[in-house]
Image: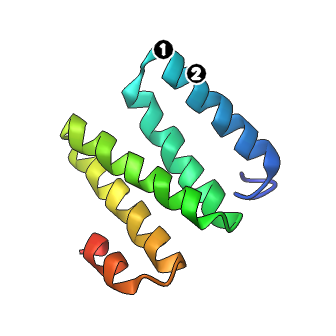
Amino acid sequence: MATKGWATPELGKAYARARNLCTQVGEAAELFPVLFGLVRYYGMRGVLQTAHELGEQLLRLAQRGHDHAQLLAAHQALAVTFCWQGEYTHAHAHAE
């Protein structure tokens, strides 16, 4: 990320691998930052529907875990993805 940016294919591959590993071992705590990174990756690549779907997964994961910090991050991710898609009313609701 630091040297090549958020949209580099290598970053996408690394996050995809991390997501696969989290799914295999069932580690929800480690899955959250991976999904958050994937939201940014797909958003920066302009794959907005995928970024939004991942944001929805983030929100469900945070709600299940009752983690306030994760809830904040998930709503922020959804606010941004809605904004990228021009859905400003929904973006505002999540930003609130």
Residue 49 rendering spot, x and y as whole percentages: 56, 63
Question: Along the horizontal axis of the image, is 80 left or right of 9?
Answer: left
Residue at image point 73% right, 53% down: 2
Q: Amino acid at mark 1?
A: Val
Q: Quadrant of the C terminus?
A: bottom left
Residue 53 rendering spot, x and y as whole percentages: 48, 54
Q: Which residue is mark 1?
A: 25
Q: Amino acid at mark 2?
A: Leu
- Count residues near mark 2 (Cα–Cα under 10 Å), then give few for <14, some for 14-19, many for 20+: some
Rendered view: 63 above or below 77: above
Residue 17 rendering spot, x and y as whole percentages: 67, 29
Given contact means CB atoms under 8 Å apart, are the residues at marks 2 and 1 in contact? yes
What's the mark number on residue 21? Answer: 2
Residue at image point 39% right, 47% down: 58
Image quarter for residue 32? top left
- Count residues near mark 1 (Cα–Cα under 10 Å), then give few for <14, some for 14-19, many for 20+: few
Question: Along the horizontal axis of the image, is 85 left or right of 94?
Answer: right
Image quarter for residue 44? bottom right
